[in-house]
Amino acid sequence: MTAAPPLPQTPRLDLRALLERVEAAAPVDAVTVVAAELSAAVAARAVSFLIADFSGHSLVRLGTVTPRGSATRTTGTESADTVAIADSPHGEVLRTQRASVTALVDGSRVLVPVTDRGDALGVLELELPTEPGPQVLADVAAAGHALAYVLIANRRHTDLFEWGQRTTPFSLAAEIQRRLLPASFTCEAGQFTVSGWLEPAATVGGDTFDWSLDRHSLQVSITDAVGHDVAAALLATLLVGSLRNERRRGVDLAAQTRAANEAVAAHGTGGQFVTGQVLRVDLTTGAAQLVNAGHPAPLRLRAGVVEELDLLVDLPFGVQAGRGFRVQEFDLQPGDRLVFLTDGMQERDAAAVDVVRALRDSAGDHPRQVVHALGSAVVRATGDELSDDATVVCLDWYGGDLRPRVSEGGASAEHAST
C-alpha cells in the first residue's frame, strides 16, 4: 500500500485574501469563511472553531444544524456543542497556548489557540489527511491568530458568538453588568499582563473590574456595589460609568474618584454605596497610585513572598458627598504580581480557600490561569452556591521603559511593543 503523499510545504494561505473574503461576508458567516479558506489552503477534511464560554469551564463548537446532527443547543440554523476544558486536549491548548498535533488512524488532528494579546478566545481544530509539516503548522497558527481579530471585529455586529458562550442563561442583572466589564479579560503588553475573572458569570452581586491603557499609563479598577440583582447592577453602572467618563476626559485619579463618589451620592438611593480600588501605573517608571475606597487590600507577590499592601482605607464611594480620596503612592518592581479581590473571595465558605498559598504556588503561571484557578477554587469551596460575586484581577509587572523609541532619523531604536 502506497503511503499518502505529504502535504505541500509551500505557503498557500493568503491572509490578505482571507480577510477580504471575511469583510465581504455577513458577520455571522465570518468564522465559516475562515474555515473554508483554511480547509482549501491546507487540504483539511474538517475545520471548526470552539469558543471559550463565560463559565471558564467549557469550549463551545459553533456550527450550523445538520439533518442528522445532535447538537447540545440550537437556535434557528445555528448549533453549539459543549466540550469540557478539564482533562481535554482542547483545554490543554487553551491553557498552554501551544499547538497540538495528534495522530489519527487516517490522518491527524491539529489544535491551535485563537488568542489576541493574551485573551484566550478559543481553539481552532482541523482534521488533516496526513501529518502536517512545519509550513502547514505555521499557516494554521497564522490563521488562528487572524481568526482572533476576525472574531473581535465581527462580534460587534451579531449575537451569535455571545449566544454560543452562554452555556448557562444570564439573569437580567448579569446582562446589565456584562456591559461594564472590559471587552477582553486579559491584556498583554511590553510592561505588564493583566487578567480578570468574575464568578459566577450568569448571576450578579455587584462586582466589576475594568482597565484601560494609554501611551503612558495603565489604569485598573475593581469595585463591589452593595446589594444584589438589578439594583446592584444599576449602582455598579453608575460608578463605572462615572469613572470611565472622567478617565476619558483626561483628569487625574483624585478627580476621577471624587466625581464617582459624587455620582453615587447624588443618584444612588439611601444606604447604597460601592467599595473599590482604582490603580494607575506609569508605564515608564513603574510608579503606582492607588485609591482605596473601603475595599479589601490587594496582595503582592514579590520574590516568593505574598503580603497585603499596607494602605490607608477611605470610605466607600457614595457614603458621604463632597469628600475626596487619598491617592497613595508606591513603586512596582520588575517581577511583582498584584492581586485584587472582592469580598466574595473571603466570605463564608469561600474563606476556606487559602489565597495566599494559592498565589505562592502559582507564581509561575500566567495571570489568566491564576484568576481562573482562584475563581474555580471558590466555586468548589462553596459547593457551587456562591452567595456573592467573587472577583479577582491579577497584574504582572515586568518593568517600565519598554516601549519602542524612535531615533532622530525616524527608525525604531529598540524592538519592543506596548
Image (cartoon, helix red, strand yellow):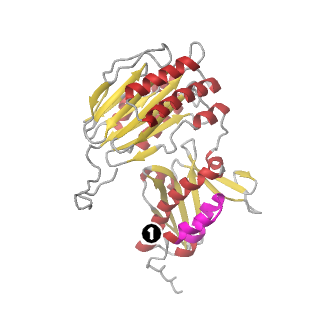
Residue identifier under label 1: 137
Q: In this view, does 99 lie above or below 174?
A: below
Question: Which region shows up in magenta?
Answer: 17-37
Image point 59% across, 30% down: which residue?
A: 204
Dominant SS type (magenta): helix
Image point 49% across, 62% down: which residue?
A: 146
65 or 285: which is nearer to us? 285
Tag 1: amino acid: Leu
139 or 317: which is nearer to us? 317
Local secondary structure at mark 1? helix
Q: In which quarter of the image is the N terminus?
A: bottom right
Image point 76% across, 54% down: which residue?
A: 76
Q: Does the magenta stretch include residue 337?
A: no
User: Residue 306, position in %: x, y?
Assistant: 31, 30
User: Residue 231, position in %: x, y?
Assistant: 63, 23
Left or right: where 406 falls relative to 314 = left
205 or 374: which is nearer to us? 205
User: Residue 116, position in %: x, y?
Assistant: 46, 53
388 or 178: which is nearer to us? 178
Total label count? 1
